[in-house]
Amino acid sequence: MQYSSQSVAKPYFIAAIGLFVGQILFGLIMGLQYVIGDFLFPLIPFNVARMVHTNLLIVWLLFGFMGASYFLVPEESEKELHSPLLAKILFWVFLVAGVLTILGYLLVPYAQLAEMTGNSILPTMGREFLEQPTIIKIGIVIVILGFIYNIGMTILQGRKTVINLVLLTGLVGLAVFFLFAFYNPSNLVLDKYYWWWVVHLWVEGVWELILASILAFVLIKVTGVDREFVEKWLYVIIAMALITGIIGTGHHYYWIGTPEYWQWWGSIFSAMEPIPFFIMTIFAFSAINRRRREHPNKAAVLWALGTAVTAFLGAGVWGFLHTLAPINYYTHGTQITAAHGHLAFYGAYVMVVLTIISYAMPLLRGRAAANSNKAQVVEMWSFWLMTVSMIFITLFLTAAGILHVYLMRMSENPLPFMAMQEKVVLFYWMREIAGVVFLIGLIAYIASFFVGGEEEAPTA
């Protein structure tokens, strides 16, 4: 490890994985509640489990992005982190805020939680993915501003590379668009219009810049390809991601009362959104093919390639399947949306965080380059268990969604909602089984860092 301040990334990575485990456990609880309606009721109602599941996803990914930034920016900038102490303080503030939020969801009725946290003063609660109490949202803003200051000062005082400037652009965009979480108009159309400015422009806009920069950093490290080669690809990827992602927001505006032209803008530009992910796939394989060395961390290379391919499938292919207005008219709000969401989040963001952890954690723990060969075998097993099970989850949800569309929205004799749910219950059981396999894969990923502790993989 070249810079001592990179060590502040370690607690962020550990917290990210810990919260990831929690997210999957609550996902399994929700999966059972689909087929056993009163499972854990009234202790953990479905709406609470769903809030915890989705909020943990967002929080642990943010921990992962922050840890990745603290690891790669000193190396890219060729300078120690501006303030390691600030990074450590913000870690504990963010962790405590995240844990208190989850405990609040689990232990306090939501209306009471809103009253306790002063939501009446500045109402922001009650919207999907943005359920956090207003006071917690303010805390998130403070943490993100401190984080961007720390990263920004490091880059400003050190070497400027395309990777760290693209990363910084993505992080600033993340902060700016989160501010729309505080705008909660009473008009539902207006509310939804700007709600997507957080939700869509995060995951289909600025987060893609963060993804591309982290992936580019890892590929440079594990392949030794020319930086100029990587930077040219990076420019193309981020240009296409921003052009398609920003205007592609319109594919959420079809049916919420916005002008009719959004059906055209949304359809055309969201149909182009697979392009940056396809380019990213070509980029990753090109980098591997042009590699100048065989890096000993085979598991990190596998995660990097897997990120590019699975992101293209989840965000690109499954997004395209139901993004055109005439198709979305029938599929909106079905399990097809959930299928796309699961594979897209896993492929694009979960996998890139696991990639940087796979590459960085051996170095942060004092290894020369990689974990032992035995540990990497376990880690690669975890890759296949998680990735294949997520693909099956996606396929089962897609099948449930297609049946939903046919039985309720296209059939000559449409079924009531609950009657339709009974027809697709087999797919929910199969999704639950695949979810258990995913959890086993995640446990294997964690275990890999404790396997073959003394033996080192040979260095490049």
Image (cartoon, rainbow, N blue to C red):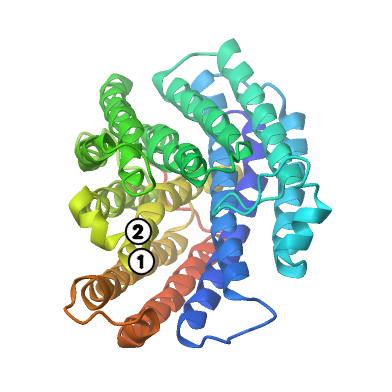
Q: Which residue is mark 1?
A: 390
Name the residue furthest top. Answer: 157
Rendered-image quadrant of the N terminus: top right
Choose between 202 and 334: the one closer to the eye: 334
Q: Which residue is mark 2?
A: 343
Choose between 133 and 6: the one closer to the eye: 133
State yes or no: discs 2 and 1 in contact (Cβ < 8 Å): yes
- Report helix, strand or loop for mark 1: helix
Q: Quadrant of residue 293?
A: top left
Q: Position of residue 214 (x, y in %)?
A: 43, 36
Q: Taking 329 as reference, is 117 left or right?
A: right
Q: Quadrant of residue 450?
A: bottom right
Rendered position, 400 above or below 352 = below
Q: Quadrant of residue 40?
A: bottom right
Tell me which residue sits at (74%, 49%) in the image.
Answer: 97
Tell me which residue sits at (55%, 66%) in the image.
Answer: 50
Q: Taking 336 as reference, is 30 left or right?
A: right
Q: Position of residue 94 (x, y in %)?
A: 71, 44
Rendered-image quadrant of the C terminus: top left
Tell me which residue sits at (71%, 68%) in the image.
Answer: 106
Mark 2 or 1, nearer chain start: 2
